Amino acid sequence: MDDTRQHAAGAVRLGTWPTPVEAAPRLAAALGLDPDDLVLKRDDLSGLAGGGNKVRKLEHTIGAAVADGATAVVTSGAPQSNHARLTAAAAARLGLDAVLVLEGGPPRETRGNLLLDGLLGARIVWAGEAGPQELAARVEEEAAALRAAGTATAVVPFGGSSVLGARGYAEAGAELLQQVPDLATVVVAVGSGGTMAGLVHALGASRVLGVDTGAVPDPVDRVTEFAAGLAREDGTPAPGELRLRRDQVGEGYGSLTPAVRDALALLARTEGVVLDPVYTGRAAAGLVAAVAEGDVRRGQRTVLLHSGGLPGLFGHPDAASLAGPR
Ligand SMILES: *Cc1c(COP(=O)(O)O)cnc(C)c1O
């Protein structure tokens, strides 16, 4: 098959590019915008086991691991981590072993991403109640044990986010600009920060509206660090001031907020597009709030990044309540 996409040294191809862009005229109308104002960037259709934004980052991080001769990868995440699921899928495709160090303990039912992790052949290690530092330490322990047993092992960072991983979203930003040259704002969920950082690098900070999900305590620092790292590598100016909303976190990362509930129903019922409660639902709720406040306006081309996460919907404890009458 013809692979025309240019890749940085060490990167591997895991997805199907470019992902489509779609108009969202009924959503735009529901928000009081003109029909052409809103576009969905379908990175949920990036290929590989359920798709999502982690595929672009893994092309670089797992690509580097393979280039270094690794035959096993270790990474970490929440129990319903989309990144962990896609690391397991990428490892399977490349013939590597995958170890996923997840927060908490085994749930009563194996659903959503966790079900796919097992199906994809990954080994799960439960880390218990662990903060970011403890989780990173557990990952290093697992990697050290594998290396001691003679297995060349690479660590893929939490959420796939590092300067290297963010490179995948700098590419996505360039791809999006080809598809939507008059883009004013792209709205994106922020977890570990690499996705927003790459977009900021490609599009400039003023055109990227991040919506925090509460996945990390310091999203501004992380996005700034990764975007600055990309700028240093390319010899371009450091990013300007970030636009990052932190009003959609609610009671925390795993909580399903009323605004997200409404946003999930809105996208489903205007465009037939399904979002997830943790990431893309928050991005959509942030978009709704930004329109209400006049931060996103009529006549400006606005893109909502659909970054995937559908398996997470099926793994969420409150998922069934979404099907009820409204
Ligand atoms: C991880 C994730 C994000 C956030 O991306 P980061 O690069 O971690 O900030 C957004 N949407 C979905 C569906 C994700 O899985």
Image (spheres, grey):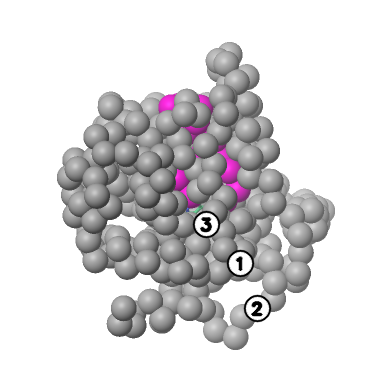
- Looking at the rendered structure, the kind of residue marked 1 is Glu
Residue furthest toward the top? 235
Q: Secondary structure at mark 1?
A: loop
- Image location (x, y in percent) of residue 120: 49, 65
Q: Is residue 139 magenta?
A: no
Q: Quadrant of the N terminus?
A: top left
**Label ID, residue 251:** 1
Q: Secondary structure at mark 2?
A: loop
Q: Is residue 150 left or right of residue 62?
A: right
- Gap in Å between the C-alphas at discs 3 and 2? 28 Å
**Is 109 placed above or below 291 here?**
below
- Classify mark 3: residues with Cα within 10 Å, few (<14), some (14-19) or many (20+): many
- Looking at the rendered structure, the kind of residue marked 2 is Pro
Q: Nearer the viewer, mark 1 or mark 2?
A: 1
- Residue topped by disc 2: 106
Q: Nearer the viewer, mark 3 or mark 2?
A: 3
Q: Quadrant of the C terminus?
A: bottom left
Asked if residue 55 shows in the view, the reply is no
- Image location (x, y in percent) of residue 12: 47, 38
Q: Is residue 197 magenta?
A: yes
Q: Earlier in the sequence, mark 1 or mark 2?
A: 2
Q: Which residues are magenta?
A: 188-203
**Label ID, residue 248:** 3
- Image location (x, y in percent) of residue 162: 63, 38
Q: Earlier in the sequence, mark 3 or mark 2?
A: 2
* Residue at (37, 66) in percent of width and height: 262
* Residue at (45, 69) in percent of width and height: 258
